[in-house]
Amino acid sequence: MFHRMPTAILTAAAFSVLLGTAAYSADESLSDKAADWWQSVKEYSAEKADEISEATSALMDDMAAEVAELKESSAETADETSEAANEELEELLKNAEEASEKLSNASGEAWEDAKEEFDDAYKALEEAVENRKEAVTREGRS
């Protein structure tokens, strides 16, 4: 699926700001250059924030669909283990959705924390989904 996609998207957006700085003429003062650069960063960040928000929303929609599919697949073997695993998936999905929302609304210093929180939450959910897929496959063979 989208392994490590959140980190790749977020890192690419952050570093492209650094690579996209404009050239300045020799007669511009350092403070003018800094002000122009900062304005460019703010404009770029606002544009990229929307793109990142859309990308994380798409990831979460895909993951929510996958969780729903896993829950449906394991409904036939609704034992305590399956129910506990499904509850864990729901909790991890909720955590990742909340982290995605924080990331969509984050700016400035909160951005790095929100990015890390989303990345951690998404990885935990992704790992749990993969483990649950394996368990459902094993249960289906039994």
Image (cartoon, grey):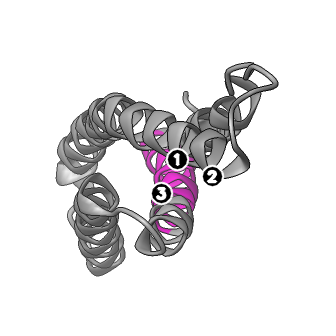
Which quarter of the rendered picture does the N terminus lie within?
top right
Name the residue located 34 percent from the left edge and 29 percent from the top edge: 47
Q: Is residue 32 above or below residue 99?
A: above
Looking at the image, tell me whether mark 3 or mark 2 is earlier in sequence order.
Answer: 2
Q: What's the residue type where badge 2 is placed? A: Ser
Alpha carbon distance from label 3 to label 1: 36 Å
Main secondary structure along the magenta-highlighted residues: helix
The residue tagged 3 is 122
Closest to the observer: 52 or 65?
52
Picture coordinates of residue 85 (x, y %)?
36, 71
Picture coordinates of residue 61 (x, y %)?
23, 36
Alpha carbon distance from label 3 to label 2: 40 Å
Neighbour class for label 1 at 10 Å: few (<14), some, many (≥20)? few
* Numbered disc 1: secondary structure: helix
The residue tagged 2 is 31
Q: Left or right of 49: which side holds 113? A: right
Name the residue located 48 percent from the left edge and 74 percent from the top edge: 109
Q: Residue 139 in magenta?
A: yes
Looking at the image, tell me whether mark 3 or mark 1 is earlier in sequence order.
Answer: 1
Q: What stretch is highlighted in magenta?
A: 121-140
Q: What's the residue type where badge 1 is placed? A: Ala
Neighbour class for label 2 at 10 Å: few (<14), some, many (≥20)? few
Name the residue located 82 percent from the left edge and 24 percent from the top edge: 26
* Numbered disc 2: secondary structure: helix
**Label ID, residue 35:** 1
Q: In this view, does 95 lie above or below 133?
A: below
Picture coordinates of residue 54 (x, y %)?
27, 31
Q: Left or right of 32: which side holds 125? A: left
Picture coordinates of residue 36 (x, y %)?
52, 37
Q: What's the residue type where badge 3 is placed? A: Tyr
Q: Residue 7 in magenta?
A: no
Q: Are marks 2 and 1 in contact (CB under 8 Å)?
A: yes
